[in-house]
Image (spheres, rainbow, N blue to C red):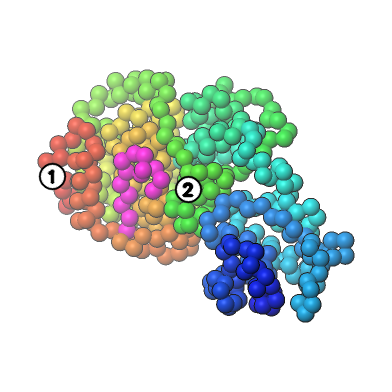
């Protein structure tokens, strides 16, 4: 693609440039990027920076048009090199690059440009992003688990300015009084209900008009590249992977205390999630574990705990109870404050992939999560660095993130039960680790 340019300029370049030299063409003395698939050098530069872990890219001179009649911002190439004319094709190729780098921030700071696939910003503003204090308006996600992860992003953003966040779960930011919490106005029933219940916690003020808008999101490519959902989310926001741990609010604990006083648990408390399905989440059934395996795993430890089963049957269809709990609170009657408090008091959280996985990690409760398809324990590896957590993956962990993929959910049961036994013995207080954890018949 650019071999002719190298042949013409390389001798002079070797004298004045000491940095890395790379190319998608084979050129002597230049690193050959065999696996970088690109169709023009500007596209190649962006994709190369992305491949090297860049989380924020600022573009200069990406006109993609004959600005002032010039073929390049620097003028025409010297002969015998040729000059471009396929500007329309470039715009298509850059749009393709935008899709391939969608998980990171790319800003086009070119003075003149025909490209519309990246946001525009003047160079001074783009460079001052981390150097000056400013305001950020964060568009948070809808789930409890994602909101907990967003705490880490907000903590990092706070280092550089004032943060406003749209969320359905304002109380999850109770320990950050400087953060301005705004209504999400979610149309999902559980989230909308919680917004009503916690309406007094929202800020009615309006963010400054010059605030930087950030949308929190992540995808499969980001998770695989960065090593966890939290790391992918953080990279998308342009911040380091931070800490999402949460101190339990005294009111949460007191509300949970009232429930426990009624139930009078005589064993260590387990926060338990049955296997559920949600119609609005097409991937929910795919990531659920095999029901028979899940039942055997939970039955292998059930007798050591006072089990409270928690779900919301008004929005969740329970497809596998697994066990008969000591207290069944799957009717959706618990408030989020009660749920948070029970998790904070629990000695163990056990369940399939759900908000409870991240809530346990945030509140410091040891947790065990049993995986099926769609994603593996990789997704929550960041939280495992903060709180004891065990992910039970199938023999062939799947990170397809595809609701139509036929994932193999088979689990090595003897190995899984032994790992659970070791985990409980090491991390769960009030459990005699000499007790045998046996497989259910």
Q: Which mark is residue 436?
A: 1
Q: Nearer the viewer, mark 1 or mark 2?
A: 2
Discs 1, 2 touching: Cβ within 8 Å: no
Q: Nearer the viewer, residue 207 or 304?
A: 207
User: Which residue is found at the position 13% from the left and 44% from the top?
Assistant: 436
Q: Quadrant of residue 398?
A: bottom left
Nearer to the camera, 139 or 68: 68
The picture places residue 93, in percent across and down from the top left corner, at 69, 67
Q: Quadrant of residue 360?
A: top left
Name the residue beneath numbered marker 2: 231
**The N terminus appears in which quarter of the rendering?**
bottom right
| CA–CA distance in space, label 1 to label 2 | 37 Å
Span of residues in magenta? 381-394
Residue 72, image x, y percentages: 79, 65
* Numbered disc 1: secondary structure: loop
Confirm whether the magenta stretch covers residue 158.
no
Neighbor class of circle 2 (other Cα within 10 Å; few <14, some 14-19, many 20+) is: many
Looking at the picture, how far across and down is residue 88, in whole percent? 78, 68
Question: In the current view of this chain or complex, which residue is farthest to the right?
Answer: 69
Q: Is residue 103 left or right of residue 405?
A: right
Label 1 vs 2, first from the N-terminus = 2
Q: Is residue 389 magenta?
A: yes
Q: Quadrant of residue 32?
A: bottom right
Query: Is 109 displayed left or right of 169 in the figure?
Result: right
At a point 54% along the width and 43% down the height, the residue shown is 239
Q: Secondary structure at mark 2?
A: helix
């Amino acid at each position: 693609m650019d071999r002719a340019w190298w042949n013409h300029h390389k001798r002079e370049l070797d004298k004045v440039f000491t940095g890395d030299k790379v190319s998608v063409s084979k050129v002597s003395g230049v690193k050959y990027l065999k696996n970088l698939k690109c169709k023009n050098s500007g596209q190649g530069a962006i994709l190369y920076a992305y491949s090297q872990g860049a989380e924020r890219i600022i573009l200069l001179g990406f006109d993609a048009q004959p600005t002032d009649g010039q073929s390049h911002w620097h003028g025409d190439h010297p002969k015998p090199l040729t000059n471009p004319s396929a500007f329309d094709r470039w715009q298509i190729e850059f749009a393709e690059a935008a899709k391939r780098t969608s998980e990171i921030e790319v800003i086009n700071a070119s003075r003149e440009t025909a490209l519309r696939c990246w946001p525009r910003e003047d160079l001074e503003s783009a460079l001052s992003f981390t150097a000056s204090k400013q305001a950020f308006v964060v568009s948070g996600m809808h789930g409890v688990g994602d909101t907990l992860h967003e705490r880490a992003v907000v903590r990092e953003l706070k280092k550089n300015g004032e943060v406003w966040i749209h969320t359905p779960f304002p109380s999850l930011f109770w320990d950050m009084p400087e953060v301005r919490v705004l209504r999400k106005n979610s149309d999902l029933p559980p989230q909308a209900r919680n917004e009503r219940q916690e309406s007094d916690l929202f800020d009615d003020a309006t963010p400054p008009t010059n605030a930087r808008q950030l949308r929190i999101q992540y995808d499969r490519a980001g998770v695989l590249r960065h090593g966890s959902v939290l790391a992918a989310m953080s990279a998308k926001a342009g911040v380091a992977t931070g800490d999402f741990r949460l101190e339990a609010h005294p009111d949460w604990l007191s509300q949970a205390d009232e429930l426990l006083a009624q139930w009078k648990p005589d064993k260590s408390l387990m926060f338990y999630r049955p296997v559920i399905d949600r119609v609005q989440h097409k991937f929910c059934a795919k990531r659920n574990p095999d029901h028979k395996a899940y039942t055997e795993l939970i039955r292998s430890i059930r007798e050591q705990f006072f089990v409270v089963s928690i779900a919301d049957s008004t929005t969740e269809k329970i497809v596998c109870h697994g066990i008969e709990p000591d207290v069944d609170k799957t009717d959706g009657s618990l408030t989020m404050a009660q749920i948070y408090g029970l998790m904070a008091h629990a000695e163990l959280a056990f369940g399939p992939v759900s908000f409870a996985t991240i809530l346990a990690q945030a509140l410091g409760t040891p947790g065990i999560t049993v995986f099926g398809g769609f994603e593996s324990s990789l997704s929550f590896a960041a939280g495992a660095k903060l709180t004891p957590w065990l992910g039970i993956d199938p023999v062939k962990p799947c990170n397809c993130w595809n609701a139509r993929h036929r994932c193999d959910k088979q689990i090595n049961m003897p190995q899984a039960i032994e790992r659970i036994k070791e985990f409980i013995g090491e991390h769960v207080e009030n459990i005699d680790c000499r007790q045998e954890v046996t497989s259910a018949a």
